[in-house]
Amino acid sequence: MTPQILILIIVAVILIYALSTHGQKEKSEADHIRDQFKMKKEASVNEDVVTYGHVQERKQELFDVIDANLGDHPTQSAQLKDIISDWADLKVKSFENRRSWVRNPEKDFESE
């Protein structure tokens, strides 16, 4: 074998090795990004998504429980009802905000 052919074979082996490891690195990065996306997607699927009606029903149920069990403590009862009302408002707002960018993307730019 001539030295030129030997050098050509060595260069070809090095290039093949470099290209194959580079592709594996990109593949592992892509797999990592895909796995992160899947985790975020699964987390959003498991979120407690409710409608306005569901929140109001749950709020009323909690008010009924408070009235039944804390009738002797009007101050604490009122405080709990305020907390529950705030929770219900936040729950509805978070639901609306999560979906609003799909319906009204311009609204985000106007508010900034």
Image (cartoon, rainbow, N blue to C red):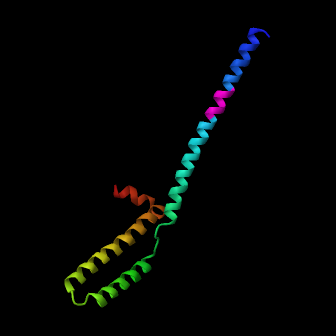
* Image height of 109 relative to 81, above or below: above
Q: Is residue 17 magenta?
A: yes
Q: Quadrant of the C terminus?
A: bottom left
Residue 50, placed above or below residue 16: below
Q: Residue reaching furthest left?
A: 75
In magenta segment, residue 79:
no
Residue 46 image position (x, y, % from top left): 50, 66
Q: Is residue 11 above or below residue 106?
A: above
| Range shown magenta | 16-22
**Secondary structure mostly seen in the magenta stretch:** helix
Q: Within the image, what quadrant is residue 85 found in?
A: bottom left
On the image, the x and y values in percent for residue 53 come to 43, 80
Q: Is residue 54 above or below residue 10?
A: below
Task: Residue at 29%, 88% (x, y): give it.
Answer: 69
- How many numbered discs sit on the rendered protein? 0
Residue at 32 percent of width and 85 percent of height: 63
> Based on the displayed image, in which of its 4 quarters is residue 2 positioned?
top right
Q: Residue furthest top?
A: 2
Q: Residue furthest right?
A: 1
